[in-house]
């Protein structure tokens, strides 16, 4: 009997030792670094589960011992996070547990997409179409169909999307960025309208958005924006036509080849402010914050005209005579 107890004790000890050894080996496999010589970009596909991803990484040789993670999922399922769709940057010094924590985190690889101030909605759509990591849900759709797709109840898209740099990751779509840009513009327009000056020549926030687009297209010189706004504001109050070239260009659409002729200035389009009274029917570009602020806080003064000086800035005049002299100086002299 004593001998039997001795044998049983030895067997138990061997079993414990074997279990301890197995556990230690399992832990060592979990702690082993990934089989990578350099960072690897890995995408978790939409709808992919834990076992699919582990099997794929094992087949690619990234994880030397996929079984170790499968055991972890069975023994400690709470330690295996739900995977998130997106691209992740796997590092050579990362172990299996760090890998799983990464794939269940928000630390996806992000990309930037910049929409410059003064671009049109058409240009923004082209930029979205060129973004390779985005899902292109708006490709081939009309502007009206795009507005319906992103649930924006507007008759015309121009001006309603804020120009900015947007971050996105693989798995996102162009509609995600458009929704962000629209929400941002609505917020910025509300803030600008709330800070508007008294006795403004504009009656609604939408008119302010239109005015801001004209300012954005007329000048990129920060200190001129409020002066441009002042000229437009005074002309509106006096019943003078705005006579701004960017509206003519917008009305010409794809016909614009870089030049505006006398015939173009006489052509009656809804946007030709040499022909129509007041503001054009919609914005002509995507204005930034500075242009929005200038539109609702125009600079006081008595200037009614301005002409480009050729260096990006403008010369402002109080009278038509002074303006014509400035045109002769800065425009006609350059063409002689």
Image: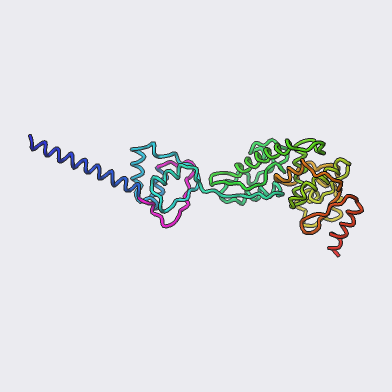
- Image check: 180 left or right of 102? right
The outermost residue toward the bottom is 336
Q: Which residue is painted at 86% across and 55% down in the image?
A: 262
State the residue in front, 134 or 330.
330
From this viewpoint, is residue 6 visible?
yes
Q: Is residue 39 shown in magenta?
A: yes
Please tell me how many numbered marks the rendered image carries: 0
User: Residue 204 in the image: x percent, y percent?
Assistant: 77, 35
From this viewpoint, is residue 270 visible?
no
- Image check: 129 left or right of 277? left
Q: Is residue 137 shown in magenta?
A: no
Considering the image in quadrants, where does the C terminus appear?
A: bottom right
- Residue 142 lies in quadrant: top right
State the residue in front, 138 or 235.
235
Q: Which residue is painted at 77% across and 41% down in the image?
A: 297
- Residue 12 lies in quadrant: top left
Considering the image in quadrants, where does the N terminus appear?
A: top left
User: Residue 9 in the image: x percent, y percent?
Assistant: 15, 38
The outermost residue toward the front is 300
User: Residue 320 in the image: x percent, y percent?
Assistant: 91, 51
What is the basis of the colouring in this image? rainbow
Magenta: main secondary structure: loop
The boundaries of the magenta stretch are 32-50
């Amino acid at each position: 009997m004593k001998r039997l107890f001795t044998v049983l004790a030895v067997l138990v000890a061997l079993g414990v030792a074997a279990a301890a050894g197995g556990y230690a080996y399992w832990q060592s496999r979990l702690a082993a670094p990934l089989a990578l010589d350099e960072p690897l970009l890995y995408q978790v596909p939409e709808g992919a589960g834990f076992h699919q991803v582990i099997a794929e990484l094992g087949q690619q040789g990234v994880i030397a011992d996929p079984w170790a993670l499968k055991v972890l999922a069975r023994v400690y399922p709470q330690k295996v996070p739900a995977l998130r769709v997106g691209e992740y940057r796997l590092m050579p010094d990362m172990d299996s547990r760090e890998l799983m924590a990464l794939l269940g985190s928000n630390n996806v690889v992000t990309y930037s997409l910049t929409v410059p101030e003064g671009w049109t909605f058409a240009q923004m759509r082209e930029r979205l179409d060129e973004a390779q990591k985005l899902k292109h849900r708006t490709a081939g759709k009309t502007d009206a169909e795009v507005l319906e797709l992103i649930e924006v109840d507007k008759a015309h898209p121009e001006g309603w999307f804020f120009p900015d740099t947007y971050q996105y990751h693989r798995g996102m779509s162009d509609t995600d960025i458009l929704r962000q840009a629209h929400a941002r513009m609505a917020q910025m327009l509300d803030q600008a309208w709330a800070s508007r000056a008294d006795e403004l020549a504009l009656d609604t926030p939408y008119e302010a958005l239109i005015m801001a687009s004209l300012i954005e297209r007329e000048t990129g010189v920060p200190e001129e924006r409020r002066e441009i706004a002042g000229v437009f504001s005074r002309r509106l109050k006096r019943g003078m036509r705005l006579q701004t070239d960017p509206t003519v260009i917008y009305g010409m659409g794809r016909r614009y080849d870089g030049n505006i002729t006398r015939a173009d200035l006489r052509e009656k389009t809804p946007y030709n402010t040499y022909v129509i009274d007041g503001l054009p029917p919609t914005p002509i570009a995507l204005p930034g914050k500075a242009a929005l602020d200038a539109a609702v806080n125009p600079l006081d003064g008595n200037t009614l005209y301005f002409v480009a000086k050729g260096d990006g800035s403008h010369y402002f005049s109080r009278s038509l005579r002074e303006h014509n002299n400035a045109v002769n100086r800065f425009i006609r002299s350059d063409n002689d």
